[in-house]
Amino acid sequence: MPTALITGASAGLGAEFAHQLAARGADLVLVARSAEALERLAAALRTDHGVVVEVLPADLVNEDDVARVIERIAEPQHPIDLLVNNAGFGLPLHFADNDIDDEVRHLRIHVEAPMRLMHAALGTMRGRGGRIVNVASVAGFISRSTYSACKQWLIGFSRWANAEYARDGVTVTAVCPGFTHTSFHERMGLEPGHEGIPAIGWLDAKDVVRDGLRDAARGKAVSVPSLRYKLVVALTKILPSSLTARAARRGRV
């Protein structure tokens, strides 16, 4: 059976990736900071789907923890067939007011950690085949502080890697959801309904993951779940950046 390694797997989109992949028969390696939350999820997945689930507690801001995840990805006897880079956290948009150490940690988990894990995965997938899914955001198509900049990097690098390594049988897909109902906003201390975003702007995590996995299977470099956000991305290509930047000050994507 194929094996998928998912970062940020204890909640939100990461947990949804785990549920949907397990339902398809994939064995899993679950990575997140909370060992307790991972063990609960792993037990449920084993019971519900009869798959093999490994638990690998790790904080991807920590170099030693990243090294342990890389070691698991590089293990030749039990190779990873699908890597899902999903771990991350948000910060307030006011960069100048944020603690710079928090910003550095933010950069490491959204850019450095995915880059390192992709490098390790490509080392084992090239020639054998495999898929890499990078969870980005529609924020990567607009200007909104360092979160947007990180996601722009992830989208751009995924586009290049998908074209570069297709010849080796590896696809790389940046999944770019809009506002999605997960615990992401709660972890930032934001209460539901306080984002200033109408109900029509919110997506369901199940739909985001289903669409992302479908587009990854098709070898697409960029996946934007839902027609409404495909339209948003299309508009960012023709509207002035000053206008999209003002609109982007609302909420967190």
Image (tube, rainbow, N blue to C red):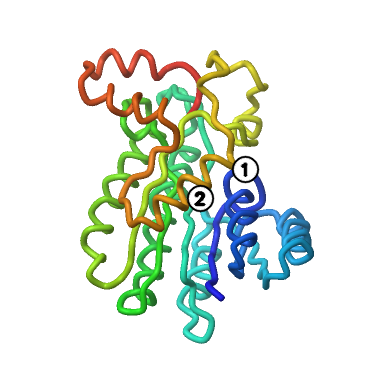
In the structure shown, which secondary structural element does the residue marked by tag 2 occupy? loop
Residue at the spot 64% in from the left edge and 17% down from the top edge: 193
Question: Which picture quadrant has residue 121?
Answer: bottom left
- Residue indicated by mark 1: 12
Left or right of residue 176: residue 206: right
* Picture coordinates of residue 8, whole percent (x, y): 58, 51
Dot 1: what SS? Answer: helix
Q: Position of residue 81 (x, y in %)?
A: 46, 71
**Residue that protrudes farthest toward the bottom in the picture:** 77
Q: What residue is disc 2 on? A: 86
The amino acid type of the residue labelled 1 equals Gly
Q: Position of residue 187 (x, y in %)?
A: 64, 34
Q: Are marks 1 and 2 in contact (CB under 8 Å)?
A: yes
- Circle 2 packing at 10 Å, graded few (<14), some (14-19), many (20+), is many
Seen in the picture, residue 177 relative to 35 is either above or below; the reply is above
Q: Is residue 222 above or below residue 52?
A: above
